[in-house]
Amino acid sequence: MSENGTMWAVWALDILQPVLLALIGLAAAYLSKWLRAKTANEQIDGVTRRLVNAAEVAVRATEQTLVAELKRGAADGKLSASDGKAAAHAALSKLRDLAGPVGIEQADSVLGNADEWARLLIEAEIDKQRVK
């Protein structure tokens, strides 16, 4: 019986070895795919957070300096449409300065169109500041 049992064990190992190797290879492929997706998601999240924070700082800085000055200079104390556009442009420029060339390059490579993202984030932050 022991010789017969040994023969069955050898036969089972001969059959299971390729199956186990295939399963290990499949698990490694899925793990690799998962890690690439996780890394990409973390890059997107990190770049987006930095841009959102830079937009908030840029709009606040522009509000405290340029917008306050433009309002003081206006007869009615309000921004004209052209002044509002100039302030938005200044905030966008400030965001680019805060992000720096490397940050803008990273945003371009991770998100696609960094300039469009920056513009939309500035507009959203301006709207958010108006509500406050």
Image (tube, rainbow, N blue to C red):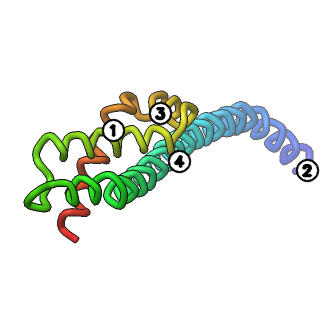
Which one is in front, 11 or 119? 119
Q: Of the residues shown, which amino acid type is indicated by label 3? A: Val
Residue displayed at 64% across by 38% down = 23
Residue at mark 3 to residue at mark 4: CA–CA distance: 10 Å
Looking at the image, how many numbered discs can be counted on the residues? Answer: 4
Sequence-wise, the earlier of marks 3 and 1 is 3
Residue displayed at 49% across by 40% down = 97
Disc number placed over residue 67 in the picture, else none: none
Residue at mark 3 to residue at mark 1: CA–CA distance: 11 Å
Sequence-wise, the earlier of marks 4 and 2 is 2
Residue at mark 1 to residue at mark 2: CA–CA distance: 72 Å
| Furthest residue toward right | 3
Circle 1 — which element? Answer: helix
Q: Are marks 1 and 2 in contact (CB under 8 Å)?
A: no
Q: Are marks 3 and 4 in contact (CB under 8 Å)?
A: no
- Which residue position holds label 1? 117
- Which residue position holds label 2? 2
Classed neighbour count for the residue bearing mark 1: other residues with Cα under 10 Å, few (<14), some (14–19), many (≥20): some
Disc number placed over residue 42 in the picture, else none: 4
Q: Are marks 4 and 2 in contact (CB under 8 Å)?
A: no
Which one is in front, 87 or 77? 77
- Which residue position holds label 3? 110
| Residue 123 in the figure: left or right of residue 4 | left
| Residue 121 in the figure: left or right of residue 98 | left
Q: Of the residues shown, which amino acid type is indicated by label 4? A: Glu
Sequence-wise, the earlier of marks 2 and 3 is 2
Callout in the foreground (4, 1): 1
Above or below: residue 32 compared with residue 70: above
Callout in the foreground (2, 3): 3
